[in-house]
Image: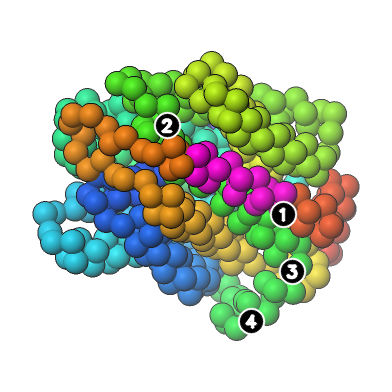
C-alpha cells in the first residue's frame, strides 16, 4: 500500500472526521446527560469507567481481527468502513436520548455508550495501525504521525470551538434538540470523510498467508515490550489531564465566568486554545525538531503544560477568573503543549513496534496500536469519572433548562471547581514526567538504529 499526496490528504481528512466524533463524545457526554438530562454526574462517570473495562477485553481482540484480515478490499478498509457506519448511527443515538424515566434513561445511556465504544474501536485501530504498516523508515512514520495527529487536532478543535454555539443555533432555547441535530451533522461528516479515505487507499488483497498470534501470545509479546508499556502509561496520564480539562471547562465558563454571554466567551477561549493546539503540531513542533530531540521536546512540553495549569490556578485565585484575556495566557500554554505531546506519543508508540520486533521477534503493530485506542478511551473514562464524582462532591447544581437565569453556585462550589480543573491535571502530568524520565529508552538515535537493523535483517531474509 503506497501513500502518495492524495493518500496523505485522505488520511488527514479521515483523522478530522474521526476525531470530531471522538471529541463530541469525550467532551460533551457528561454535560449532556448530567446538566441537560439531569442524571447524576457520578453515575455518568461510573458508566464511562465500566465501558472502558469492557473495552479492555474488546480492543485487543479487535487488534487480532485486523491482523488476521486479508479480504479482497485489503486489511484495513473493511474495518474502517463498517466501523464508521455503525459508530455514526450509535453516536446519533447517544445524543438523541428519548423521553424516559430516570431509571430508563440510565439503562439507555449505559447500553448506547458501551455500543459506541465497541463500534469506535472497530475503525480506530485499523486507522492508526496503518502508520507502521505502510513505511519502514522512522522519518516517514514521524511525518505520517504528524499529519494524522495534526488533522485529528483540527477535528477536535472544530468540535471544541463550534459545539456550544452551533447547538444554540440549531436548538434555540432547547439544548436537547440542538445536540440531537448537531450529532446528526457530525455523524454524516464522519461517514463522508472515512468513505473518502477508504476510496483513496489502493489497498490490494494479497495471496500471502499472514502469520498471526493467539490472544495469549499477543499479551505475552506486548508485556515483554517494556517501551510500549511505558508509552501507554504516559499516554494514560497525559490524556487524563487533557480530558479532565475538556470535561470541566464548559462548567467553568457557565457557572464561574458566567454572564449572559458565557457561550461566546467559551467559544473564544476554545477557538484560541484549539488554534494553539494545531499551531503547536504544525509549526512549533517542526521548529523545535530542528534543534531538539523528540524526548527533549516531550519533557519541555510536559513542564510547560504543568506551568500553564499552575498559572491558571493562580489567575483564578488572584481574582482574574472573569478576564478572558488573562485566562488565554495559561490556556495557550496548556493547549500548545498538549498538541505537541499528542503527536509525540504516536511517534513513540510507532517506535515501540520496531523495538518489540527486535526484542521478541514478533511484529504486532495492530496489537500495540489497539492499546493506544484502549488507553485513550480509558483515560477519558477515568477523567470523566473523577470529574463526575468531583462535581457531586463540590455540590454543583445542574441547569437542566437552557432558559431563564443560570443556577447560582456557592463560593465553595466555585473554589472546588477551580481546584478540580487544575490540581488533578497537574498531578497526572508530574507523574507522566517522572515515568518518562526514568523508564523511556527510545531516543531518536536508538530508534533509527533499530529501524536500520530490522531493514537489514529483512533484506538478508529476502536474499
Please give the residue where the numbered disc 3 appears in the rendered image: 225
Q: Position of residue 264 (x, y in %)?
A: 36, 21
What's the distance in space between the residues labelled 1 and 2, CA to CA? 29 Å
Please give the residue where the numbered disc 4 appears in the rendered image: 217
Provide the secondary structure element on which disc 3 rests. loop
- Answer with mark 1 or mark 3, whichever residue precedes in sequence: 3
Callout in the foreground (3, 2): 2
State the residue at coordinates (63%, 36%).
309
- Asked if residue 454 is among those painted magenta in the image, a careful observer would answer no
Provide the secondary structure element on which disc 1 rests. helix
Rendered-image quadrant of the C terminus: bottom right
Please give the residue where the numbered disc 2 appears in the rendered image: 256
Query: Which of 303/8 is in front?
Result: 303
Say if residue 33 shows up in the picture.
yes
Residue 345 circle label: none
Q: Is residue 154 left or right of residue 36?
A: right
Q: For the magenta stretch, what is the residue range?
A: 415-432
Amino acid at each position: 500500500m503506497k501513500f502518495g499526496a492524495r493518500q496523505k490528504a485522505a488520511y488527514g481528512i479521515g483523522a478530522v472526521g474521526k476525531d470530531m466524533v471522538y471529541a463530541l463524545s469525550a467532551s460533551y457526554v457528561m454535560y449532556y446527560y448530567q446538566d441537560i438530562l439531569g442524571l447524576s454526574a457520578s453515575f455518568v462517570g461510573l458508566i464511562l469507567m465500566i465501558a472502558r473495562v469492557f473495552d479492555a477485553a474488546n480492543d485487543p481482540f479487535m487488534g487480532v481481527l485486523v491482523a488476521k484480515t486479508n479480504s479482497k478490499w485489503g486489511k484495513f478498509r473493511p474495518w474502517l468502513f463498517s466501523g464508521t457506519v455503525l459508530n455514526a448511527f450509535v453516536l446519533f443515538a447517544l445524543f438523541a436520548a428519548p423521553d424516559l424515566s430516570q431509571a430508563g434513561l440510565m439503562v439507555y445511556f449505559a447500553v448506547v455508550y458501551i455500543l459506541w465504544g465497541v463500534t469506535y474501536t472497530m475503525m480506530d485501530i485499523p486507522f492508526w495501525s496503518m502508520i507502521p504498516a505502510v513505511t519502514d523508515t522512522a522519518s516517514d512514520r514521524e511525518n505520517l504521525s504528524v499529519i494524522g495527529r495534526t488533522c485529528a487536532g483540527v477535528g477536535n478543535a472544530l468540535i471544541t470551538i463550534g459545539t456550544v454555539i452551533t447547538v444554540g443555533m440549531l436548538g434555540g432555547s432547547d439544548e436537547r434538540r440542538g445536540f440531537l441535530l448537531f450529532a446528526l451533522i457530525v455523524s454524516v461528516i464522519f461517514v463522508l470523510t472515512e468513505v473518502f479515505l477508504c476510496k483513496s487507499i489502493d489497498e490490494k488483497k494479497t495471496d500471502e498467508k499472514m502469520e498471526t498470534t493467539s490472544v495469549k501470545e499477543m499479551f505475552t509479546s506486548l508485556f515483554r515490550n517494556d517501551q510500549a508499556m511505558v508509552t501507554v502509561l504516559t499516554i494514560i496520564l497525559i490524556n487524563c489531564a487533557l480530558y479532565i480539562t475538556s470535561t470541566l471547562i464548559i462548567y467553568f465558563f457557565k457557572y464561574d465566568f458566567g454572564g449572559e454571554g458565557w457561550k461566546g466567551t467559551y467559544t473564544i477561549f476554545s477557538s484560541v486554545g484549539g488554534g494553539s493546539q494545531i499551531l503547536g503540531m504544525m509549526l512549533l513542533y517542526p521548529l523545535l525538531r530542528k534543534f531538539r530531540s523528540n524526548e527533549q521536546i516531550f519533557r519541555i512540553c510536559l513542564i510547560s503544560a504543568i506551568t500553564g495549569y499552575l498559572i491558571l490556578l493562580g489567575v483564578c485565585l488572584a481574582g482574574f477568573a472573569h478576564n478572558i484575556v488573562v485566562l488565554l495566557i495559561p490556556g495557550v500554554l496548556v493547549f500548545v503543549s498538549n498538541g505537541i505531546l499528542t503527536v509525540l506519543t504516536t511517534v513513540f508508540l510507532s517506535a515501540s513496534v520496531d523495538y518489540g520486533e527486535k526484542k521478541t521477534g514478533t511484529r504486532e503493530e495492530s496489537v500495540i496500536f489497539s492499546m493506544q485506542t484502549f488507553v485513550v478511551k480509558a483515560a477519558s473514562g477515568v477523567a470523566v469519572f473523577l470529574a463526575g464524582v468531583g462535581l457531586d462532591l463540590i455540590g454543583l447544581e445542574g441547569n437542566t433548562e437552557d432558559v431563564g437565569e443560570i443556577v447560582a453556585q456557592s463560593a465553595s462550589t466555585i473554589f472546588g471547581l477551580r481546584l478540580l480543573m487544575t490540581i488533578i491535571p497537574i498531578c497526572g502530568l508530574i507523574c507522566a514526567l517522572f515515568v518518562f524520565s526514568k523508564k523511556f529508552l527510545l531516543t531518536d538515535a536508538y530508534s533509527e538504529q533499530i529501524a536500520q537493523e530490522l531493514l537489514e535483517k529483512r533484506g538478508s531474509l529476502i536474499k
